[in-house]
Image (cartoon, rainbow, N blue to C red):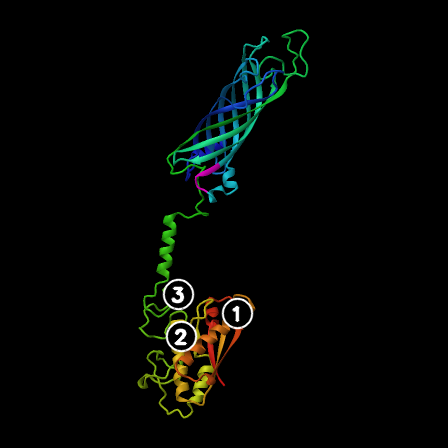
Amino acid sequence: MLILVISNVFSQSKYNRWSIEASIGPNKPMGPLTPGFLSPTLNLGHADLGLRYMINDYFGFKGDLGVGSFSEAAGVSPVFTTNYFRMNIQAVGNIGKMIDLPSLSRKLGMLAHFGTGFGRMSFENTRLDTQPDYHYNFIGGVTTLYKLGKRAALTGDISIIYNGRQTYTFDGNAYNAPFQPIIPKQNPLVHAPGTWWTGTIGVAFYLGKNETHADWYVREAEYATKEELASQINGLKDMLNDADGDGIPDYLDKEPNTPVGARVNSMGMTLDSDGDGTSDHMDQCPFLPGPSSTSGCPVEEINDQLDYFRKALNDGYVNVYYAFDSDKPLVFSISAVAYVANFLKKNPGVSVEVKGYADELGTEDYNMKLSERRAKAVYDLLTATGIDESRISFKGYGEDTRVDKTSVEARQMARRASFEIK
């Protein structure tokens, strides 16, 4: 115990370890008592003073001194007075934390204690010429705590004490033996046990420079302070900022300064769908390669626009993207719907199917329904532009199993609706 105490005294700690505890309350000698002698159920006659040290916020030790007296039940028992004191060293366990009592209330606590020591009883007005009786004992009990503040707590304790080698009964008028000697006052030298209990209320005073005591310490890994939570929330808010307004939060945006109206991918990077070096928002023909001198459109006249349109759609250049578990199109990809709608208006003989997809997260049945809702959302946008419903169909295809399931970026690309010319 001394090694543990010394090593912890010189180590840094986030909580205080020492406390002084004082309490008073009733006692009750359960037995043995001389036949005819009785004690009251609640005899207010016990006081306790202790010094406790916690090795950590779960276990510790304490030494305590208990003093008091037993007396008769008035009117129903002969008079007797027995004075006593006991000294004990005990192990202490914070069972309140073990049963997660702090999750119910930060002001309630509970300790269990058990130990051993010795005691002394002296008797007044007995029929025997009794001498002070010395014995060893074992003690165990439970202490409830109610936090008053950083430096004090109310205590309520119930303890059971078991005396060993007790010479006399608790009233001191008989030997603690199965038989009494024939010759009065001749000790039969039979030492039997005795049992008694105490119930006390008191105060624990906490010592130390830290803000809290081990009784009330809450591990930082399990609970965050209000200040820490506020800091984390502010950090999340900062991460969700979208400085350039492209629909991609800053913590995901690899191009945080894209121009207003630029069409970007799921990482906030400006798209160049046809790879001609002209960004889509500046390219008048975003799916047909051409030089910048013609605003990204081919120099040669295009005779079969349908072939180019079919290639752009079938090669996956035109897609509408969604956030995780959402059927609301992301802002940056809405321009794909406008592109398809404009082409359909110029080519009334063309029909398309909207095909919805989901990533692999979630059950197969749920992903099938989610992909269908995504396709239906694009269908609704196209019909809202005036395209006849007979020219558009939609269908959910569930999970896109072609993507890399270990890649966050790939899963984002899987959450989409694409188009196919029918």
Which SS class for mark 2?
helix
Which is nearer the N-term, disc 3 or disc 2? 3
Q: Is residue 272 left or right of residue 392?
A: left
Give the extent of the magenta segment. 105-109
Query: Mark 1 or mark 3, which is nearer to you?
Result: 1
Q: Which residue is mark 3?
A: 252
Asked if labels 3 and 1 touch by Cβ distance under 8 angstroms, the answer is no
Name which quarter of the figure residue 159 lies in: top right
* Mark 1 residue crowding within 10 angstroms, few (<14) / some (14–19) / many (20+): many
Which SS class for mark 3?
loop
- How far separated are the C-alphas under marks 1 and 3? 24 Å
Residue at 39% over, 51% down: 229
Image spot of residue 321 (x, y percent): 43, 73
Task: Give the residue type at disc 2.
Answer: Ser
Image spot of residue 295 (x, y percent): 32, 84
Query: Mark 1 or mark 2, which is nearer to you?
Result: 1
- How far separated are the C-alphas under marks 1 and 2? 21 Å
Q: Which residue is mark 2?
A: 333
* Camera-nearest residue between 296 and 66: 66
* Mark 2 residue crowding within 10 angstroms, few (<14) / some (14–19) / many (20+): many
- How far separated are the C-alphas under marks 3 and 2? 16 Å
Which is nearer the N-term, disc 1 or disc 3? 3
Image spot of residue 391 (x, y percent): 46, 85
- Looking at the image, is 181 positioned above or below residue 320? above
Q: Which residue is mark 1?
A: 367
Image spot of residue 186 (x, y percent): 64, 8
